[in-house]
Structure formats: structure tokens, C-alpha cells
Amino acid sequence: MEYSRNFYQILNNEEIFEKIVNEKNDIGYYNLPYKDIAQITNYASSVKQKIIINIGIGGSSLGAKAIYKFLKSSRTSLKRMIFLDTIDPLEINYLISDINLEDCHFIIVSKSGNTVEPISVFKYISSLVEINENNSVIISEINNSLHSFAKKNKLRFFEIDKDIGGRFSVFSVAGLVPLSIAGVNIQKLLNGCREVSESFFSKKYYYEHIMNKARFLVENKSRFNNNVIFSYSSIFECFNKWFVQLWAESLGKKNINGTRQGLTPISLIGPQDQHSFLQLILEGPRDKTVTFFKIKNLGIDTIIPKIDNFSDFETNYLDNLSFKEVINAQADSTIESILQEKDIPCDVITISQVDEFNIATLMFRYQLLVSCIGKFLQINPYDQPGVEMGKILLKQKFQNSD
């Protein structure tokens, strides 16, 4: 009797790790923590404009936006950065309505150099203000339309390597150039990435957390198909959106047998979503995992004051507490309520403080987690054939209308 097979089989951790190590030769994001940033910081220091307009979409924008928004509320030294990551005319005009475009520095980010949204917005901005070598920088792959435009108009150009996908590009020039111009310490970002990378590839702290979580999610994907991140601070809002793209676009694929795979990301912000989605988590179907993000030290000690005129309120037990104490207590109470159910998979990631190092460790950790899940599922987490088909159909739609 002869026997052969090609059905899906979950590999062991050592096999997955070996595949990840081998993948470092072909997938560029693994090497970004060790990138030489001298050219980036030199260029950033030459930018004199105080307002930065970043034109991009998806992976070319979300990563930088996540880091900038995470840091901005506690970092008054950062330049104002506006992200034109939409083609909604109402939003575009609202975002630029109160600024003098003559005093702005424009960053155009498109890996392919022909993405509909950023190129359309770039053309619109070009109709409003002269684009020249003193106010603009192009970030793209080489040998495409945007690269040619940069050469023709003598604009500064930074190359995105072909082996770095958009949603894995936040620590490439796509993210580092705009963030450095805005005043973010990008070396500290890379230091955070480096700590995670070195720990993971030496099979220490991050290896255990990442590999074990990846295996759990894959082994239980039929039961717990929805993965909630519950972030307890509004500064995580854009990080949550970055996570949704990373998770959905990387993991929603057909595997080597043509079987449809995928985990569904759900983004929540606390305490707001305690008053909506938490009810579904606690008393709804048991089809979700929940990961909480907390910040130990928000860096702001604003107090809820005791005021005599409010003496009749039942919430006066909060008087003289800081808002950060309350929000962390809310997080802990929500976590405790989930743990008491005993059948909702839950983990908690606590960030010590709001800085470049900590947000970078979190983001690089999730990139590695997605890579490991991809290997367990036997899919390619770095392409997006479904998205590409939509782009093809859009192009055909307008071409056929001529």
C-alpha cells in the first residue's frame, strides 16, 4: 500500500522558528531594526517648515500615523503632521482648510508609485501649491511613475525596498522619514524593534510569548475566530487601525490546499467601548479572544477635583484621584470581569510609559506574531491578492468609461 498526502498539518514550534529564520533572507522587515538612519536624520534636520503633510494610504500611512498619534498628546515638541490618507473631498478640504500650504512640507508615500488615492491627492495639492525640492520628498520603489516624477522635478527621493510590504513598512523609510521630520526619535524606535528581534531570535522572552500565542490562536481558530484588542487610552486609536490592517490583510488567505483561512480583528478603545461592545464579549457567543493594552504611566497627573457643588453625586469616591488612576482601574475591572467568566481567552500587555521605545516594541512584536501565525497556517502573510483584484477592477471601470 502506498500513501501520500498534502492536507493541512500544524507544524511544531521549532519547525515554525526555522522557517522564520530562513525567511529573513527574503522578507525585508526583519532587518529594519539595524537600518542606518543617517541619511534620514540629516534630511529631517534640513526641513524648516513647521507643518508636515503626509500623503499616503494603507500601509504607507497607518504605521507612521499610529506612532505619531501615540506620541503627540504628550510631546508638544513634535511638529504638526496632517495625514491625507483619504480621497473624501470633505475630509481633505477640512484637514487643509486652516493652514497655509506655502508653509508646509509634503511627503508623498506610495510603494508602487501608482496608488490611486495618494497620487490623486498629490495632484490636487500640486494644483494649489508649487511642488519643488524645497518643500517635498518622495518615498517609493524605484523605476515607477512616482520615481520618474521625483527625478524630473529634482525632488529628494527615498527608496522603499521591494522586499518590504506596505503593512510591514513602518520601520522602513516609509515610516521613519515622516516621523523623523516631525521630531520623533527614530533611533529609539529602532532600539525598541531591536530588543524584540534579538529576544525572539535568541529564543528568550519575546520568543515564548509570540510563539505560544501564535500556536494558541491557530489551534483554536475554529472556536475563537474573532480577536479583540481592547486598548485603554485614546492614543492607541490609530495603532488599533494599524493592527486591523496588519491582521486582516495578512491572515485572510487561502492556504497551500486552497482552504480559506483567517482571523478577524476587532478594535476597541477603553473606557468608551465598555459601554457598548463589552456586553457582547461577556454575555455573547464564546468566539473571541481579548488582548488588553494598558499604559502604566500616562505621564499626566490631572486630578478629578472635589467640588462642593457636586456633593450629591454618587461618584464622589473618585474625588482627588488622577484620571490615569481611574482609567487603569477601569481596565483592571474589565479584565477581572472577563477572567471571572473563565472561558474567554485573555491576555494583558502593559506598556511602562508613552515613548518611542515602547510603541516600537509593541508594533514589531505584532509583526513577528503575524509572521508566525502565517507560517502555522501555511499561508503567505505578505501578499494581498484580494486587494490587488479590487485595484484592477477599479482601473478597468474608469478605462472602460472613456
Image (cartoon, rainbow, N blue to C red):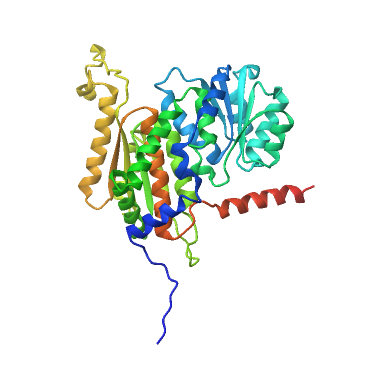
Q: As displayed, is residue 172 above or below residue 78?
A: below
Task: Measuring from the top left, give residue 346's x and y in whole percent.
Answer: 28, 47
Residue at the bottom extreme of this rendering: 1
Left or right position of 184 against 323: right
**Closest to the observer, 118 or 36:** 36
Q: As displayed, is residue 146 above or below residue 15?
A: above
Left or right position of 78 against 12: right
Task: Measuring from the top left, give residue 299's x and y in whole percent.
Answer: 32, 22
**Closest to the observer, 315 or 73:** 73
Q: As displayed, is residue 334 above or below residue 74?
A: below
Q: As displayed, is residue 284 above or below residue 34?
A: below
Please identify the quarter of the rendering in which residue 156 is found.
top right
Q: How many labels does the image show?
A: 0
Task: Measuring from the top left, give residue 258's x and y in whole percent.
Answer: 50, 66
Please identify the quarter of the rendering in which residue 327 is found.
top left
Task: Measuring from the top left, give residue 351's x and y in whole percent.
Answer: 31, 33
Q: Residue shown at 71%/32% (left/top)? A: 151
**Closest to the observer, 296 or 274:** 296
Residue 266 in sight in this render: no
For the N terminus, give its image quadrant: bottom left
**Closest to the observer, 317 or 155:** 155
Q: Residue shown at 44%/42% (left/top)? A: 243
Left or right position of 84 against 147: left
